[in-house]
Image: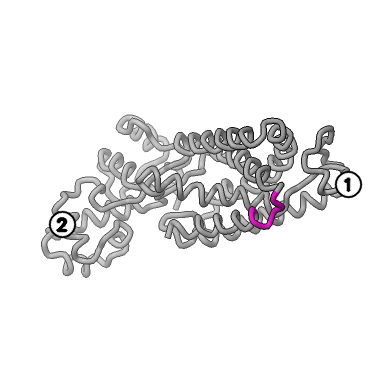
Amino acid sequence: MLWIPAGLSLVMGLWALWSAEPEERPRLLVGAAFVLLAVEGFNVALPMWRYVFLPDRMVVRVIWWLGFAGGGALWLGGVSRLRWTDGPAAEGAGEPGEVASLTARGAQRDILSHFVVGVAWLIVMLAASAWVPGGPRLNTLRTASTPWMALVPVGMLLWTVTVPHLARVGRRGGGAGWTVGGGVAVAAAWALVSWGTVASVTPRIRDLPGVLPSHAESIQLFGYPTPESLAKADPTDLIRSVPAVPEEELERVRDVARLAMHRGMGTRFSRALAALEIGSPEELANWDEGHLVGALNSVEASPPRRAWVRSWLTP
């Protein structure tokens, strides 16, 4: 399910690239790379923003991210392709001597068109993410809306400011200039993502705190392959379906699975909470934010952001 929004975003970005004029495509790619860098930098600055349940294999994670975030940046700029200049559209894409201006002829129209495009992408991605386990939901706007909405104004402003200047650099440096510039921007964007916004990776039953390998194998064998399916299981059906695991242990494992799935927490932070003798969402709710942040800082080498902890405790 995690690939649904990534696939949609990538298809939209490739469509924007295909529909552009051949001579515009290098500029479009590099401009999208720098917008992606700026947006991810902005996301790092947003305390609440986080990617949840990403693939645990790094190569697969990078592919997913390029499809989701890269495709979105490409489409966001490619469809509207703003040109805040007084010249015709064909001559306003970064010609030497031209200056971007908010008051130039047609600028207000272009701003509106880009805003509409950005909101359309936002709606599509939010709708697609409704199928992602633990992902943002329209009914949890307190934790989801701020970072998603940031993509619209940040992408809108940075695209129009950076692309004309990048076009001049690209013409001077040739193909090598485009390649190096875009590659550096994408690499820097990924470094920002890895450093500050990946909250959890794909949860697995064997990674839940305190679960024996033999018990994890039995639970998966009898019809509960993921922590999500285990968290949603009816307790009576679970006990009846998995006779090889003691009843008390099944109840405990189900509780920690529910905790790992809670607000995209993941297994790493659920193990940190287990060290604090927190084994279910109900036990987590008994803590206040300040004490929990302090306790996690004492048991976790890379503790979660305070805003993430706040989201776990939000009813």
The residue singled out by tag 1 in the image is 105
Left or right: 199 in relation to 46: left
The residue lying toward the viewer, choosing from 57 and 251, is: 57
In the rendered image, which quarter contains the N terminus? bottom left
Viewer-side label of 1, 2:
1
The reply, left or right, for residue 195 in relation to residue 251 is right
Give the residues drawn in magenta, as a range: 17-22
Amino acid bearing label 2: Glu
Give the CA separation, mark 1 to mark 2. Answer: 71 Å
**Residue placed at 62% from the left, 56% from the top?**
121
Prevalent SS, magenta region: helix
Examine the structure image and report whether residue 140 is included in the region drawn in magenta.
Answer: no
How far across and down, in percent of the image, does residue 13 sit?
Answer: 60, 54
Dot 1 amino acid type: Arg
Report the residue at 45% width, 42% height from top. Answer: 308
Q: Which mark is residue 182?
A: none
Nearest to the observer: residue 98 or residue 294: 98
Image location (x, y in percent) of residue 282: 32, 52
Q: Which residue is mark 2?
A: 248
> Residue 275's x, y, as percent?
25, 38
Q: Are marks 1 and 2 in contact (CB under 8 Å)?
A: no
Mark 2: few/some/many CA within 10 Å (<14, 14-19, 20+): few
- Kind of element beneath mark 2: helix
